[in-house]
Amino acid sequence: MDFTFTPEQEALRETVRRFAETELAPLVREADDNEVFPKHLFRRFGELGLIGVRYPAEDGGAGFDKVSDCILREEMSRVCQAFSSSWSGHSHLGIWPIWKAGTEAQKQRFFIPGLAGEKIAGFALSEPDGGSDIRAMRTRAEKVDGGWRLKGSKLYITNAPIADFLTLAARTKPEMTPDAVSLFLVELPNPGITIHRLKKEGIRGSDTGLLYIEDAFVPDDCLLGARTGTYPLLIESLVENRVGVAANALGMAQGALEAALDYAKTRLVRGKPIGQFQAIAHKLADMAAEIEAARWLVYYGAWRVDQGTLDAATAAKVKLVASECAVRVSEAAIRIHGGAGLMRDYPVGRIHRDSLVYVIGEGTSEIQRNLIARGLGL
């Protein structure tokens, strides 16, 4: 078993880390306080090739693999998970289905400008009543002359308030069957869609929206792949993305550890750094060990994606372990900071708020345990 990263992957890590520390870090506090994503970053993501890391070179991407995608996610989330969340909602969930199943015209119209960061995408799946339970989806698409009429609602949609288009899931048949759910490419603004920006406690620097869809018209050429019944593509995208968001969680945990370690080396009590007290030193040691265990599970999951052998239970294990690790480590970092950990001048409170999003979003920890148990034959 080879646990080393390639020189190209290490170079990618260095590039993303430098970008995150020099260009993203100065924007984090303002974005978090104002709860607004700096939209110009999407063009920077595109200029640096960060949106296309996972896509083949022949399709305009950088030609890297899932392991590399997770390296990017880890490094970006280490500095700011909110920015990484907006990037992920666009680069994977928003445009990945178009690359995977879109017509050539749809790729030219949506995917190519999406890769360049010229158009911002969102992925509209979750709903107020059913969350991400696709079979409980109530948003419906009715066939009409020249296109479709959409009615329903979507909740917690990343990038929706700033998006140029949404990859939106709707029911095209009344039956509760996989082939009854289809994807539409919905350009914004649309007179039939009202978007409300949501105020959040976590990932505040990433715009999130609630959508009211009232008889919104979508032309025929915006039905993804010019066919109905793209439920399997949804599942494939969500399963793989659990490994991706696990890398996000890993980055948050690493950022919290580094902040706590730095504080423990510089905060003096009775004339010596608090890191020299065994209680603090042991806490930091536990944090470092848990992160290392999560790191190799994350990259094992990414390797499984690249081998084409990832299954739902393995993806659930990766996401469960990494997301819960981020919550525990970031809480421990706050405790090490003491009162300072509750002050906005330190990053650990923000990291903890952000980490809580991922024991809920992308499938709760309880859902991950259900999937793992199902994999055990229970």
Image (cartoon, helix red, strand yellow):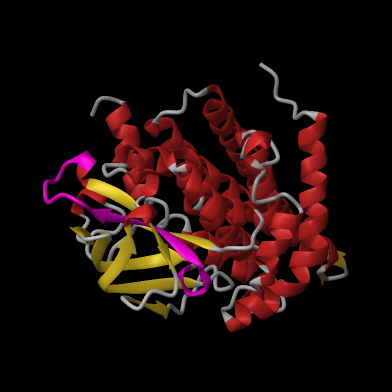
Q: In the rendered structure, does residue 178 fall within the stretch colored magenta?
A: yes
Queried whether the magenta region covers residue 378, the answer comes back as no
Q: In the displayed structure, would residue 378 be above or below residue 213?
A: above
Q: Which residues are magenta?
A: 160-179
Q: Is residue 113 left or right of residue 105?
A: right
Residue drawn 22% across and 56% down?
137
Q: Residue furthest right?
A: 271
In this orientation, which residue lies closer to the viewer: 364 or 143?
143
Residue 46 shown left or right of residue 350 in the figure: right
Residue 200 horizontal/vertical position (percent): 47, 75
As drawn, the residue found furthest toward the front would be 145
Q: Residue at x 64, y 51 (%)?
A: 51
Q: Position of residue 81 (x, y in %)?
A: 61, 61
Which of these two is toward me, 90 or 260? 90
Q: Position of residue 146 (x, y in %)?
A: 27, 60
Residue occupying image coordinates x 44% and y 79%: 197
